[in-house]
Image: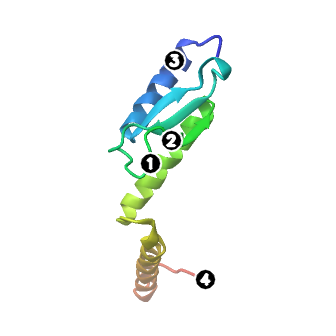
Amino acid sequence: MSDVGFNTYERIKKLESVAQKMGFRLTGLGRGAPDIFILKPNDDESLPVFNKDLSLFGGNLEQTEAFLHGIEWARDYDTRLGLRTSKTRPKAEQKVRNRRLIKMIKGTADGKKDYTF
């Protein structure tokens, strides 16, 4: 990353902020690979399952942004389902499908909407 423009600098600062909010710290490999960013747990309390020196992800700027975006999406999805563990995800998703099916059936029974399978 020999030439870093202001936009790239802003992206890196935003990435650091998002990473910190999610319990990660953003580091780099240094001279050997200056374009590679490494995500590690911020401390022993933010992600207690992981050792704070463990590298959880490594990639260029775009890859690291996409990885963190995926983590945010997954956390938001689990929050919307009201999950505490991933083991209950299939059951929670099925509950949502069942609720939608019941709404759809009630809508056709009332003559309001016509759903065909």
The mark lying in front, picked from 4 and 1, is 1
Which residue is located at x 63 percent, y 30 percent? 60
Identify which amino acid the numbered label 2 is placed on.
Leu
Residue under label 2, please give it. 54
Locate the N terminus by quadrant. top right
Q: Nearer the viewer, residue 79 or 26?
A: 26
User: Distance of mark 1 from mark 3, alpha carbons?
Assistant: 29 Å
Identify which amino acid the numbered label 4 is placed on.
Phe
Which residue is located at x 57 percent, y 41 percent? 57
User: Distance of mark 4 from mark 1, alpha carbons?
Assistant: 46 Å
Lower sequence index among marks 4 and 1: 1
Residue under label 4, please give it. 117
Q: Which element type, helix, strand or loop, lies under badge 2?
A: loop
Q: Percent from the top left, x then y, of residue 25?
A: 44, 33
Identify which amino acid the numbered label 3 is placed on.
Tyr
User: Distance of mark 2 from mark 3, alpha carbons?
Assistant: 25 Å
The mark lying in front, picked from 4 and 3, is 3
Q: Percent from the top left, x then y, of residue 116?
A: 58, 82
Residue under label 3, please give it. 9
User: Distance of mark 4 from mark 3, alpha carbons?
Assistant: 51 Å
The mark lying in front, picked from 1 and 3, is 1
Lower sequence index among marks 2 and 4: 2
Report crowding for label 3: few under 14, some 14 to 19, many 20 or more residues within 10 A (C-alpha). Answer: few
Identify which amino acid the numbered label 1 is placed on.
Phe
Q: Which element type, helix, strand or loop, lies under badge 1?
A: loop
Q: Which element type, helix, strand or loop, lies under badge 3?
A: helix
Q: Quadrant of residue 88?
A: bottom left
User: Distance of mark 1 from mark 2, alpha carbons?
Assistant: 7 Å
Mark identifier at residue 50: 1
Report crowding for label 2: few under 14, some 14 to 19, many 20 or more residues within 10 A (C-alpha). Answer: few
